[in-house]
Image: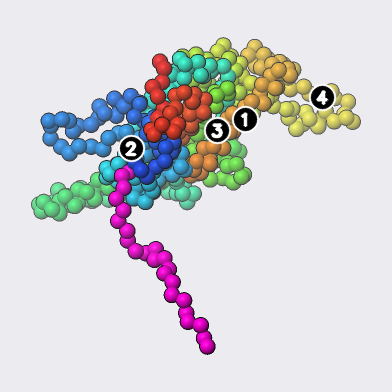
Amino acid sequence: MDQAKARVVLPNRKQLELRPSDLESLLPEGHRARLVWGYVERQNLAGLYAGIKAVEGGPGRPTIAPEILLALWLFATLEGVGSAREITRLIEQHDAYRWMVGGVGVNHPTLSDFRRVNGDFLDDLLSTHLAALMAAGVVKLEAVAQDGVRVRASAGAGSFRREEKLLGYLQVARQRVAELKRQVDADPGEDNRRRQAARERAAREREARLQAPLDRLPELAEIKPRQGKPAEAARASSTDAEATVMKMGDGGFRPADNLQYGTDVETRIIVGVEAVTTGSDQGQLAPMLEQVIGRGGQAPQAWLVDAGYPAHEQIDAVADRTEVLAPVPKAKAKAAAKAKEDSPEPAVDPHVPKPGDSAAVIAWRARMATEEAKQRYKERAATAECVNAQARNRGLQRLPVRGRDKVKAVALLFALAHNLMRIAQLVPEWVGIGTGTSAIQEMPG
């Protein structure tokens, strides 16, 4: 006799459930989102509030609190999210993002505009943090390590054009603008005039986008001869004029931006940020030193960089303010060949002064010959390269924006998010882990 089939209740995961709950109950104490919010609400956001036109007793709809937008970007950066559209999707699906907005409607254009227009505020915030940490004695700024990280640009590799092609596109764009302007002037219909005016604005924007790469071509043309190529080979992107084809870490060449970070060696707090459009690190040492002095009010005793930075003119420019610790380039191939054992020529010591060396360069060569300088230089990799690796792990693989100012805003967000987590480790008394808010307390100074 066959056994009867058992009757069981299987789960139905497609059914809808309505469960009353408050947003506070969604996140455990000590959650990273609480840490970020506690940090943001204790910042001086007067610069962000100054631009809000809706005021008590006046007309207009209330605007989204700047705390929400700043907190969303910092938390998203820590989570490796760099897209405004992705953040708005997560607000609907992720408890941490839902908790952060607290029922306030946030769309992706608002998030994008916040990041685009507030680069100066983010830069000032980085300086404020450094000043507070130095006042508390956490950051002494005795040694700074600088390094660059090349990040794939938003521009496509196929968007790069030579001058002749760009001029052709620009001529077509100008003709289109003139044609649309004639149509607007000739058509008396109000609705149609508005549509035509919108088309004219779009055409003017395209014209401006095509003029930008033409304006940059002379700069790129000066670089080509140093690469052994004719100046006429220079090409600029028609979609992101400031993107430059650079040699990447894997040996390939792709459109990229060079993000420069200066990091305090002792604490690994980022103290300087810059976005440059050249693939080489040469020429970036002195500007970063000036920036760090402006932020911290003092020059570090030592400046650690790799072999791509110490051009002689850069060493001369900073010699009176800091000691450069960087490897001295080895002898050229021809000189190295003479240094073989079977050659009567003596080996070339790169630390010995050469004709034409300045006093600062001679001192640098002698300094790097000492064991003390060699040992101290080893701290560079553990500092600068560690910061770059953490940025990569947090999603800094491809830039979601175009234009140097927007790129720097992205770089600043990574620096602020990085420093936030470092503060939580270095100054635990400033952080209330497990208290319900997990907030960084008021910073001294």
Look at mark 1 in the image and give the residue it sits on.
Answer: 382
Residue lying at 61% horizontally and 23% vertically, measured from the top left: 304
Mark 4 vs mark 1: which is more N-terminal? Answer: 4
Residue lying at 67% horizontally and 26% vertically, measured from the top left: 378
Look at mark 3 in the image and give the residue it sits on.
Answer: 387
Is 9 a magenta residue?
yes
Q: CA distance from mark 4 to mark 2?
A: 61 Å
Query: In the figure, 145 relative to 227: above or below?
Result: above
Q: Residues within 10 Å of mark 4 (few under 14, many from 20)?
A: some
User: Is mark 4 in CB contact (under 8 Å) with mark 1?
Assistant: no
Q: What element does badge 3 sit on? A: helix
> Is residue 3 something that shows in the picture?
yes
> Is residue 231 something that shows in the picture?
no
What percent of the width, then of the height, locates residue 431? Answer: 44, 27
Front one among 296 and 286: 296
Residue lying at 49% horizontally and 25% vertically, measured from the top left: 428
Q: What element does badge 2 sit on? A: helix
Q: CA distance from mark 3 to mark 2?
A: 25 Å
What percent of the width, then of the height, locates residue 229? Answer: 58, 40
Instruction: Please tell me the numbered disc located at residue 69.
Output: 2
Q: Count the marks: how many?
A: 4
Look at mark 4 in the image and give the residue it sits on.
Answer: 347
What percent of the width, then of the height, locates residue 418? Answer: 48, 32
Start-end of magenta stretch: 1-23
Residue lying at 16% horizontally and 50% vertically, measured from the top left: 194
